[in-house]
Image (cartoon, rainbow, N blue to C red):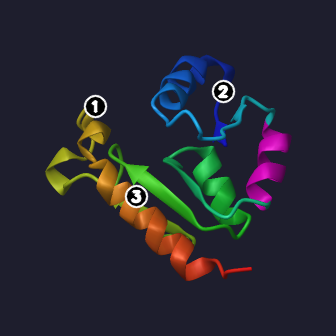
């Protein structure tokens, strides 16, 4: 599930177009109350430092924050930071310096620790 504001549709379309053809994906520009309901039932949230990251953490869901404009967040144990190097914090466009493999590894670790096989 990709969630964002209607203004982020071009970005979500670009992400979806880069996925394998057999990947099932839902793109949602749902209002915030529906987004909260989705987050409440999510296995994991991954995104930048926005309200959705904080809402996921508040819903007691694991949340991986991609951080480039602020220091890693430490106020919730539900948020795990994947951030740029300290000298890159606040630099425009620095989020693109976070290697996808670091994000994937964080997702894999979180899902491995917090899900059980059914």
Q: Can you tell which mark lies on residue 5?
A: 2
The quadrant the N terminus occupies is: top right
- Give the main secondary structure, helix, strand or loop, of the magenta stretch: helix
Marks counted in the figure total 3
Tell me which corner region of the image, top left, top right, bottom left or bottom right, holds residue 25: top right
Question: Which quarter of the picture shows residue 4?
Answer: top right
**Residue 91 seen in this snapshot:** yes
Please provide percent x and percent y for residue 94. Answer: 25, 38
Q: Nearer the viewer, residue 29 or 91?
A: 29
Residue 72 appears in the figure = no
**Region rendered in magenta:** 32-40
Q: Residue at x 37, y 65 (%)?
A: 105
The label on residue 93 is 1
Q: Is residue 72 left or right of residue 7?
A: left
What residue is drawn where x is 51% and y is 24%?
A: 11
Q: Which residue is mark 3?
A: 104
Q: Is residue 33 magenta?
A: yes
Tags 2 and 1 in contact by the CB under 8 Å rule? no
Q: Residue at x 36, y 49 (%)?
A: 70
The crowding category of the residue bearing disc 2, from other C-alpha atoms within 10 Å (few below 14, some 14 to 19, many at least 20), is few
Q: Residues within 10 Å of mark 3 (few under 14, many from 20)?
A: few
Q: Residues within 10 Å of mark 1 (few under 14, many from 20)?
A: few
Q: Earlier in the sequence, mark 2 or mark 1?
A: 2
- The x, y position of residue 15, in whole percent, is 49, 30
Give the CA distance from mark 1 to mark 3. 20 Å
Q: Which of the two discs, 2 and 3, sits closer to the camera?
A: 3
């Amino acid at each position: 599930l990709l969630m964002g504001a209607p203004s982020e549709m071009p970005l979500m379309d670009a992400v979806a177009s880069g996925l394998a053809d057999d990947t099932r994906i839902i793109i949602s520009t749902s209002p915030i109350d529906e987004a909260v309901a989705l987050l409440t039932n999510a296995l994991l949230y991954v995104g930048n430092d926005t309200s959705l990251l904080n809402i996921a953490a508040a819903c007691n869901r694991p949340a991986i924050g991609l951080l480039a404009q602020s220091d890693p967040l430490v106020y919730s144990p539900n948020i795990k930071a994947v951030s740029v190097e300290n000298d890159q914090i606040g630099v425009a466009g620095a989020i693109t310096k976070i290697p996808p493999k670091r994000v994937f590894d964080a997702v894999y670790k979180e899902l491995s620790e917090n899900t059980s096989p059914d």
